[in-house]
Amino acid sequence: MMDKLLVFVPKKTSRVRYVFRLVFKELLKVDCTLSSDLDEFLSADSAKLVYADKPYSDDIFFRSSGLLFERGVDSIETDYIEYEGNNALFPVYDKDSALPFDVFSAIFYLVSRYEEYQPYVPDAHGRFTANLSFSYELNFLDKPMVNIWSIIVRDVILKKYKDFNFPKRNYRFRPTYDIDSAFSYSQKGLVRSIGGYFRALRNMDWVEIMQRSRVLFSGFKDPFDTFDLQIEYQRRYNLKPIYFFLFGHYGEYDKNVNTRNRIFRFLIKKMGDYAQIGIHPSYYTNENPELLHKEIRYLEDVVNKEITQSRQHFLKLKLPTTYRNLIEEDITDDYSMGFAALPGFRAGICSPYNFYDLDIEVETKLRVHPFMVMDGTLKDYMDLTPTDAIEQIRKLIDEVKKVDGTFTSLWHNEPLSDEKRWKGWRRVYEELLVMACEE
């Protein structure tokens, strides 16, 4: 039984090494050796394929479009064709090629986020938005095309080498939480509490005034304090979540509790007993790396552990700046790869992978963990009902299960309150847990 693959490439560039390691070692779980020695390749007695601009033998041939043998970022015209019901990038139009498109360039284009290095018009928060992406334009944002294309490559190889051994991959579920505001009313301090009363009076919101007063003066539980419920979910479904705490100073976009607050710090320690803790860098840390450094160190002091995981507040991900800042702070895993406005697969993949820095043509050790769906996306951007949101989530989970990927959800503590604007949304998350945990 075969379990090793030899690949001939005219030149072993950083891009070539990166993509073939991603596809074969990480996604297909097999050994893959690259060779630029044609004589060595031709004389080898093993499963083989050629990735070049022309076939050099009668082995499996994947026609290259040239992208993986280039350096730098150019304004390339990205054409596409339809293949097996989905659009595919980089058509090659070569009768000898095993596929009518350069599958490896297509994969590199999506996971490297090549299009995000080119000029674009950002949104109000400086973000590359979903409607700007080729995945959205070509109608496959809701499919993990990198995983799908990798399976197509596997099937091409199996067609020629029927006894080639591809190990079975296992589907996984990774729940994550962003804690932007741990409490709705309590632990906010006198000034913010008085301001909250004034806003409610101005709006004549008597229900808000009554609820705030019950929490502050009558000992009622804060509606955003849903953490015991989350712990119950962990026990019931055997979950291993990650919590990303916003641990910065109060500001226009940063409204968590004061970082010196004893109750808040106790909450972080408590959740750290049940789950992993990561940093949720505050709004302006992209522009101020020193602020990022301080927030990570302060959070480490609270949990008495090294912080190695991160997700950007407001999903403010600017490439390569954000990831370089995180690498500088010894962050090893980031969970920001997803769009705020639409669910789906921003990098076309539902498996963790290493960040490739296109500016310097280097594969880094920073692991990128894409997420597929966020509560605020479904409610605030898409204006879905709870029932429609459940159906949207179901489709995404099904897509991930088809390719044995990792389904990663992004939720907040607020929707689990099941109150006010989040009425009915606790059921959405509970349905998500049931669907995601089903084998």
Image: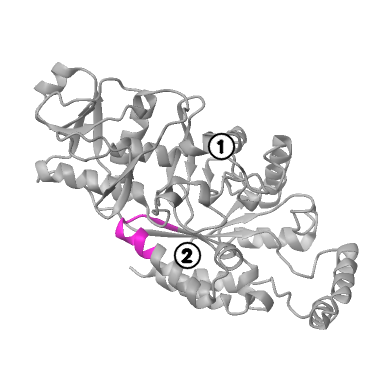
Q: Where does residue 346 sit, x and y in percent of width and height?
A: 47, 49
Answer with left or right where residue 223 lies relative to residue 339.
Answer: right
In the rendered view, does 67 fall on the left or right side of 97? right
Position in image of residue 183 (x %, y %): 73, 67
Give the residue at x 14% y 16%: 39
Q: What residue does disc 2 label? A: 239
Q: Position of residue 368 (x, y in %)?
A: 48, 44
Secondary element type, mark 1: loop
User: Looking at the rendering, which quadrant does residue 196 occupy?
Assistant: bottom right
- Label 1 belongs to which residue? 319
Part of the protein shown in magenta: 397-407
136 or 253: nearer the viewer:
136
Against 104, residue 270 (above or below) is below
Q: Residues within 10 Å of mark 2 (few under 14, many from 20)?
A: some
In the depicted structure, whether residue 123 falls above or below residue 418: above
Along the line of sight, which residue is nearer the eye, 410 or 238? 410
Q: Disc 2 on helix, strand or loop?
A: loop
Q: Residue at x 53, y 76 (%)?
A: 386
Q: Amino acid at mark 1?
A: Leu
Where does the C terminus fall, quadrant-wise?
bottom left
Provide residue 222's location: percent of width, then percent of height: 73, 74
Task: Say which label, 2 or 1, has the lower sequence index.
Answer: 2
Asked which quadrant contains residue 238, the reply is bottom left
Q: Is residue 236 visible?
A: no
Does 21 lie within the magenta span?
Answer: no
C-alpha gap between disc 2 and disc 1: 31 Å
Which residue corresponds to the image point at 68% horizontal and 59% vertical from the top-left? 180
Amino acid type, callout 2: Leu
Q: Is residue 399 located in the magenta-colored stretch of the structure?
A: yes
